Image (tube, coloured by chain):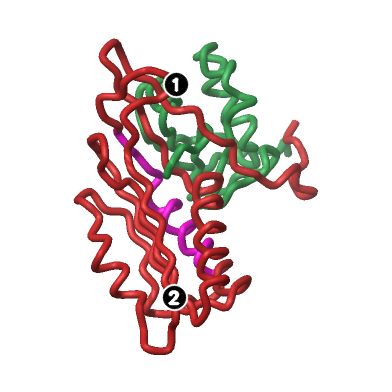
Chain colours: A red, B green
Amino acid sequence: MATLPYEDIYQLVREPIEMAVLARHVRAPEDGAIVTFDGFVRNQSHDRATLYLDYEAYESMALAKMREIGAQLHEKYRIHRVAIVHRLGRLEIGETSVFIAVSAPHRGAAFDACRFAIDTLKRTVPIWKKEYFEDGAVWADGELPPTPTATRRGKPAS
Amino acid sequence: MPHVSQTIRVSVLFFGRLKELVGHAEESLEIGEATTIEQLFGLYAVRLSELAKYRSSVVASRNQEFAAWDTPLRTGDEVAFLPPVSGG
């Protein structure tokens, strides 16, 4: 995998995400813009009042996939630094579950990269949320990540 | 001399609703050499018919990379069965 700039941050945390610290971290004198994405817990889902959410992850793989997204950002866009942090465990309404900050010399690349990062994260990073309601809990509908189709070397064992 | 089949040891992980169905998150398992990911899933699905119903909405990974179902496993592999992801 491509080497990521050492200033980048990719983390899974169980405490509140320090958004201001992360936004400051990606900010550098040679940049002209930072775009941030703050994803937080909504108070309802499919017209039912949500009490709270519980997030779990396949942590080693989730971090690897988050770094992979970072590598793609640096490859595709003229950006400077990236921070992608996802929180796990129980989150209350209004608490931030995911935060992304991207700095760049110019705003266009920062907007595009931030959008690409959250869209790709939601499709490919192995994290799951369970939604708790007054009358029960359900695993949130998710997206099935794109996976390799049949390998040529994988002949079925008899 | 007949071919003596070897066994390999892999760890198998389940997440989300699959973990709840199977009843545990991780186990170490001894299986026949060259068992594919599909066949490994089948070992669980024959015991848990509920799990079999989810087959079309599960993806698999091998050593933290998404993997095709016909991937043959090697000893020491970490295989995970993942339901649709819902982070963010």
Question: Observer-nearest residue: B86 or B16?
Answer: B86
Q: Position of residue A28 (x, y in %)?
A: 36, 84
Q: Which type of secondary structure does the marked residue at label 1 adopt?
A: loop
Furthest residue toward left: A15
For the C terminus of chain A, give its image quadrant.
top right
For the residues labelled 1 and 2, the Cα–Cα distance comes to 36 Å
Q: Which mark is residue B75?
A: none
Q: Amino acid at mark 2?
A: Ala
Of helix, strand and loop, which mostly describes the magenta segment? helix
Q: Position of residue A42 (x, y in %)?
A: 34, 34
Question: Observer-nearest residue: A150 or A66?
Answer: A66
Q: Position of residue B53 (x, y in %)?
A: 59, 16
Q: Is residue A58 magenta?
A: yes
Q: Amino acid at mark 1?
A: His
Q: Which chain hosts label 2? A: A
Asked where in the image residue A138 lies, by quadrant, the reply is top left
Asked where in the image residue A127 lies, by quadrant, the reply is top left
Q: Height in image: B45 above or below A35?
A: above
Quickly name the residue at label 2: A33
B43 on left or right of A53? right
- The residue at the point 41 percent across, 18 percent down is A47
Please tell me how crowded label 1 is: few (under 14), some (14-19), or many (20+) other residues with Cα within 10 Å.
few
- The residue at the point 38 percent across, 47 percent down is A39
Badge 1 and badge 2 in a common chain: yes
- The residue at the point 56 percent across, 58 percent down is A116
Q: Earlier in the sequence, mark 1 or mark 2?
A: 2
Q: Which residues are magenta?
A: A54-71
Please tell me how crowded label 2 is: few (under 14), some (14-19), or many (20+) other residues with Cα within 10 Å.
many
Q: Which mark is residue A46?
A: 1
